[in-house]
Image (spheres, rainbow, N blue to C red):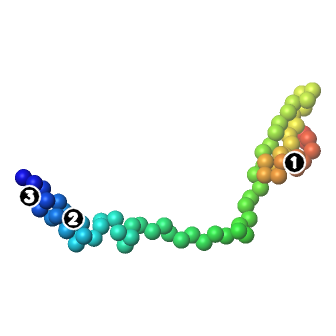
Amino acid sequence: MKKVKVIMLSAVICMLLIFPSWASTSNVLKQPEVALQNDVTKAEVTKWYYRNIDGVKEKRLWSITYGYWKTEWMPV
């Protein structure tokens, strides 16, 4: 029985040494190369806010991107 185990273990070791690994580097998917562009201009994000003062509806534009009011309160 011991002789059979030694032969089987030797056969497994020989197979591992002879046949290449399935996860070799040639089979691994490579990440696509993406060019980074630092000079991309993005649009400013804004939001209108509304209020009702003494029955007069007013609106004002807020810049979410830069964090400041772009307009004063104006009637709608």
- Residue sitting at x 82%, y 39%: 49
Which one is nearer the viewer's eye here, 24 or 72? Answer: 24
Q: Amino acid at mark 1?
A: Tyr
Q: Earlier in the sequence, mark 3 or mark 1?
A: 3
Identify the residue under disc 1: 68
Whether residue 76 appears in this view of the structure is no
Which of discs 3 and 2 lies nearer the camera? The answer is 3
- Residue sitting at x 30%, y 67%: 21
Q: Is residue 72 left or right of residue 47?
A: right
User: Residue 60: x, y in percent?
Assistant: 86, 42
- Residue sitting at x 8%, y 57%: 4
User: Residue 12: x, y in percent?
Assistant: 18, 62
In the structure shown, which secondary structural element does the residue marked by tag 1 occupy? strand
Image vertical order of residue 70 relative to residue 75, above or below: below
Identify the residue under disc 2: 13
Which one is nearer the viewer's eye here, 34 or 4? Answer: 4
Identify the residue under disc 3: 3
Determine which quarter of the picture holds residue 2. Answer: bottom left
Q: Amino acid at mark 3?
A: Lys
Check the image and name the residue furthest to the front: 2
Q: Amino acid at mark 2?
A: Ile
**Image quarter (top left, top right, bottom left or bottom right) of the C terminus:** top right
In the structure shown, which secondary structural element does the residue marked by tag 2 occupy? helix
Q: Is residue 33 left or right of residue 60?
A: left
Crowding at label 1, few (<14), some or many (≥20) Cα neighbours within 10 Å?
Answer: few
Crowding at label 2, few (<14), some or many (≥20) Cα neighbours within 10 Å?
Answer: few
User: Residue 47: x, y in percent?
Assistant: 78, 45
Mark 3–mark 2 distance (CA, rounded to whole Å): 15 Å
Mark 1–mark 2 distance (CA, rounded to whole Å): 70 Å
Q: Is residue 35 left or right of residue 63?
A: left
In the structure shown, which secondary structural element does the residue marked by tag 3 occupy? helix
